[in-house]
Amino acid sequence: MDALNVQVMVQARPSSGERLTQQIEAVREAGHADRFVFFASLDLSNVGPGSGTRIAAQLEEDVRAGAVGIGEIMKSFGLTTRKADGTRLALDDPERRAASASPSSSTPGIPLSSSSPSTTRTSAGSRWRSSATGS
């Protein structure tokens, strides 16, 4: 990484739960915790009543494990992701939004990576940069 002048590597494919924890632990054990950052993914499958609590709990666990943000939500999100009742899951769906609105002391203000222009104009970049580089 030094030969290529790469200071920090960002995990491009977010993961969650045990897989994310294993990835973070492997980097820590290799002695490179300050050179890699990890983004968590959200399990938005079968969203229905109560899903916001489940999603928020998993996100809190991922942040405790070391995730610094939520990975990219692709442009195809609204076309391919379906709720438990078979309807399409909208980005502003109340159950999905419940996860980000759930009170938590461990996950306030974590950045969201998105290919949607409406979510990239936030101050999350400066917070991520601060979290990733320690500055």
Image (spheres, rainbow, N blue to C red):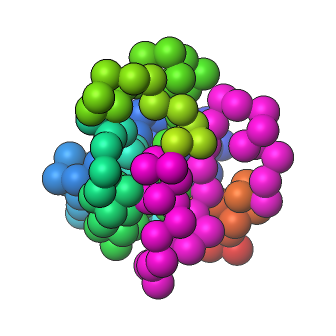
The residue furthest right is 121
- The C terminus lies in quadrant: bottom right
**Percent x, y for residue 85?**
29, 29
Residue at 46% over, 70% down: 102
**Percent x, y for residue 59?**
37, 60
Occupied quadrant, residue 133: bottom right
The residue furthest bottom is 105
Question: Where does the magenta region start and end?
Answer: 94-123
From what the image shows, is residue 73 above or below residue 102?
A: above
From what the image shows, is residue 104 above or below residue 96?
A: below
Residue at 17% over, 53% down: 18
Foreground of the two, 14 or 99:
99
Is 106 part of what is drawn in magenta?
yes
Occupied quadrant, residue 57: bottom left
From what the image shows, is residue 95 above or below residue 79?
A: below
Side of 117 relative to 53 (left or right):
right
Occupied quadrant, residue 60: bottom left
**Percent x, y for residue 36?**
47, 53
Is residue 17 visible in the rendered image? The answer is yes
Foreground of the two, 97 or 115:
97
How many circles with numbers are drawn on the protein? Answer: 0
Side of 32 relative to 28 (left or right):
right
Is residue 26 visible in the rendered image? The answer is no
Is 31 part of what is drawn in magenta?
no
Residue at 23% over, 53% down: 17
**Percent x, y for residue 89?**
46, 31
Residue at 31% over, 22% down: 86
